[in-house]
Image (cartoon, rainbow, N blue to C red):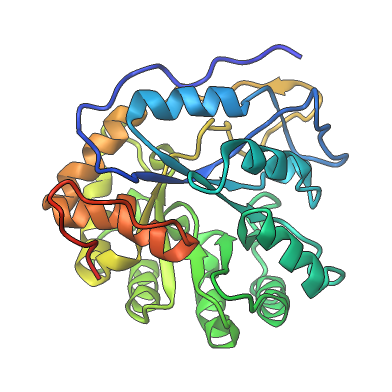
């Protein structure tokens, strides 16, 4: 199976702090781990070695591997990658059968480096609030391990359903890719943004500033996202995370699983530089890149260059 072109090798211009973490990456290794039947797309190779090379060029030291939909509930590829990367630099988010997975199986996943489960409602373009709420209720009943989270990828239109179910969760909730919002949702007139800010203010919800290219129409620096990120930073900077979404699958509604789908060329250096400009203060940037993911996923706090302890 040929390997589509991955992201351009462009080094970030900033000097990111030790322990900088990319909280949203995928690994695809179809030669060793076959994809599931019924998938909506077929990606090429994006191996652990390619991930390490990409992160080395950016100055990123840690990664959270997210189970992609093409592997279904077979987390074997991700678990193999976690073993190869090691616990000092990696954690995982699994996809499980909510109705059949036992606590013992979750404990085994924890020992392998997993720190949560993902509900991918967007891959099938879920738009029914009742079905979304049911899945969140099932996740709430299943996941109560210390140090774990429930991660949700859904359209912004489902945020009200998420908000209605948050009190049942015994672990933090993580919302993928700007919680489904895009640059057009910025501004006080946006009801979805108000809902997201209310969720964020509870302190029980984390938002991933991830996959900028999915939320922005102004690549590569995504200036239009500044108006969306600003209110998030002003509400709870200690609940924001950064993720690349490497290796950048194409997305969309007209996908053909019978052909290998090329990855998007994404300038991650430009995305990181944009994040640094929005965060403005080094302390805020360090929170997003280092302290928040260390707290959420259980990484050891790295030593700071100035000798100070990490921010509380």
Nearer to me, 240 or 108: 108
Quadrant in which the C terminus is drawn:
bottom left
Nearer to me, 36 or 111: 111
Q: Position of residue 273 (x, y in %)?
A: 22, 35
Q: Position of residue 39 (x, y in %)?
A: 79, 40
Q: Position of residue 252 (x, y in %)?
A: 60, 38
Considering only vertical position in the picture, is 23 above or below 295?
above
Name the residue: 83% across, 32% down. Answer: 34
Residue situated furthest bottom in the rendering: 167
Name the residue: 78% across, 30% down. Answer: 257
Considering only vertical position in the picture, is 100 above or below 51?
below
Q: How many marks?
A: 0
- When asked about the image quadrant of residue 80, the answer is top right
Name the residue: 26% across, 51% down. Answer: 303
Quadrant in which the N terminus is drawn:
top right
Nearer to me, 24 or 263: 24
Name the residue: 81% across, 48% down. Answer: 74
Nearer to me, 301 or 219: 301
Q: Position of residue 99 (x, y in %)?
A: 84, 72
- When asked about the image quadrant of residue 193, the answer is bottom left
Considering only vertical position in the picture, is 237 above or below 45?
below
On the picture, is 276 further left or further right than 4? left
Mark yes or no: residue 263 visible.
no
On the picture, is 279 further left or further right than 38? left
On the picture, is 9 further left or further right than 284? right
Considering only vertical position in the picture, is 262 above or below 123?
above
Mark yes or no: residue 56 visible.
yes
């Amino acid at each position: 199976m040929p390997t589509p072109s991955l992201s351009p090798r462009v080094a970030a211009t900033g000097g990111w702090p030790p322990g900088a973490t990319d909280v949203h990456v995928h690994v695809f290794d179809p030669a060793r781990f076959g994809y599931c039947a019924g998938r909506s797309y077929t990606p090429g190779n994006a191996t652990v070695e390619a991930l390490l090379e990409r992160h080395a060029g950016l100055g990123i030291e840690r990664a959270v591997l997210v189970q992609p939909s093409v592997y279904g509930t077979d987390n074997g590829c991700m678990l193999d990658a976690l073993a190869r990367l090691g616990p000092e630099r990696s954690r995982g988010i699994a996809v499980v059968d909510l109705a059949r997975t036992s606590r013992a199986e979750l404990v085994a996943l924890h020992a392998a480096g997993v720190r949560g489960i993902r509900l991918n409602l967007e891959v099938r373009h879920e738009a029914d609030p009742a079905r979304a709420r049911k899945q969140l209720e099932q996740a709430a009943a299943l996941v109560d391990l210390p140090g774990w989270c429930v991660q949700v990828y859904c359209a912004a239109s489902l945020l009200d359903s998420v908000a209605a179910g948050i009190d049942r969760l015994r672990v933090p909730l993580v919302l993928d890719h700007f919680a489904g919002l895009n640059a057009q949702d910025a501004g006080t007139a946006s009801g979805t943004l108000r809902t997201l800010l209310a969720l964020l203010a509870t302190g029980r919800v984390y938002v991933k500033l991830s996959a900028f290219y999915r939320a922005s129409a102004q690549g590569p620096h995504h200036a239009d996202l500044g108006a969306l990120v600003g209110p998030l930073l002003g509400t709870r900077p200690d609940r924001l995370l950064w993720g690349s979404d490497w290796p950048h699958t194409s997305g969309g509604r007209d996908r053909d699983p019978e052909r290998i789908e090329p990855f998007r060329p994404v300038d991650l250096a430009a995305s990181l530089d944009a994040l640094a400009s929005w965060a403005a203060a080094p302390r805020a940037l360090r929170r997003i890149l280092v302290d928040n993911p260390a707290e959420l996923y259980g990484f050891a706090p790295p030593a700071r260059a100035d000798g100070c302890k990490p921010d509380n």
